[in-house]
């Protein structure tokens, strides 16, 4: 191959990846903007319907519901829904399409090695599924603790004169600290489980790389 032909092929590949990068940038931008808009629109509609549902309840319903719990629930839960629609859904779709494409290319190129390395998928799925169950449980307990703390803070601030008149500031502060400590405890456990999940996932990924290069041949 002459030097001129080599430069021509190199320029062809460069242009190919340049066009591919531009197309990927445009499609990812459109998809990301669309999911963000959809998440904000859906969370706003849910907030409106949730508030309308609360206002239609009987007065006895609010005897069991704290003053600050409604605001805390609307803020925290709707943020979770918006994050799920705007971030988690596109990430899940991207990961799914990447997995399908990788499987197709891998089995077309070298099906024996691909079949052996497929076992790491089950290990990753087990770690993520188990970790997500624990994360959901800890997240609920953390939100409940924050809701109770928000209710107490709302009641204290709304009756500040009585609180100061009876000298219960320190007692109520300690009571509020109990809720914050409980929320901190569950939040720390949640982040610890998340760290274990991420570490396990990347550990399996690197072990998968090891399996690709050792032994060097699978016959």
Image (cartoon, rainbow, N blue to C red):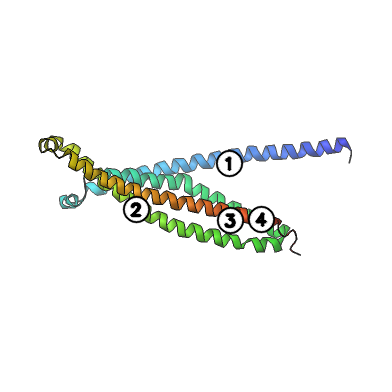
- State how many labels appear: 4
Q: Which mark is residue 204?
A: 3
Where is residue 194? Give x, y as percent: 46, 51
| Label 2 vs label 4, nearer the camera | 4
In the rendered structure, which disc, 2 or 4, sits on the residue that comes first in sequence? 2
Mark 3–mark 2 distance (CA, rounded to whole Å)? 29 Å
Mark 3–mark 4 distance (CA, rounded to whole Å)? 10 Å
Residue at disc 1, secondary structure? helix
Look at the numbered discs 2 and 4 and tell me whether their residues touch, using CB distance below 8 Å.
no
- Label 4 sits on residue: 210
Residue at disc 3, secondary structure? helix
- Label 2 sits on residue: 140
In the rendered structure, which disc, 2 or 1, sits on the residue that comes first in sequence? 1
Q: Residue at x 39, y 55 (%)?
A: 136
Where is residue 114? Give x, y as percent: 67, 60
Quadrant of res 29: top right
Q: Is residue 136 visible?
A: yes
- Label 1 sits on residue: 27
For the residue pair 174 and 150, the one nearer the viewer reads as 174
Q: Residue at x 50, y 39 (%)?
A: 33
Label 1 crowd bin: few (<14), some (14–19), many (20+), radius 10 Å: few
| Label 2 vs label 1, nearer the camera | 2
């Amino acid at each position: 191959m002459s030097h001129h032909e080599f430069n021509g092929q190199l320029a062809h590949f460069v242009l190919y990846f340049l066009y591919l990068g531009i197309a990927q940038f445009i499609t990812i931008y459109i998809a990301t903007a669309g999911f963000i808009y959809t998440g904000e629109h859906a969370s706003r509609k849910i907030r409106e319907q949730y508030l309308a549902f609360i206002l239609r309840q009987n007065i006895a319903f609010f005897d069991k519901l704290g003053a600050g719990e409604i605001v805390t629930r609307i803020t925290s839960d709707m943020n979770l829904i918006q994050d799920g629609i705007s971030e988690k859904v596109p990430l899940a779709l991207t990961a799914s399409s990447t997995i399908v494409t990788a499987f197709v290319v891998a089995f077309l190129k070298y099906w024996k090695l691909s079949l052996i390395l497929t076992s790491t998928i089950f290990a990753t799925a087990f770690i993520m599924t188990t970790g997500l169950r624990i994360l959901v449980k800890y997240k609920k307990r953390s939100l409940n603790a924050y809701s109770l703390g928000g209710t107490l803070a709302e009641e204290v601030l709304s009756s500040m004169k009585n609180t100061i008149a009876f000298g219960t500031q320190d007692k109520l502060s300690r009571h509020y600290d109990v809720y914050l400590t409980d929320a901190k405890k569950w939040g720390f456990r949640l982040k610890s489980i998340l760290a274990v999940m991420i570490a396990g996932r990347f550990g399996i990924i690197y072990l998968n790389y090891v399996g690709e290069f050792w032994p060097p041949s699978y016959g």
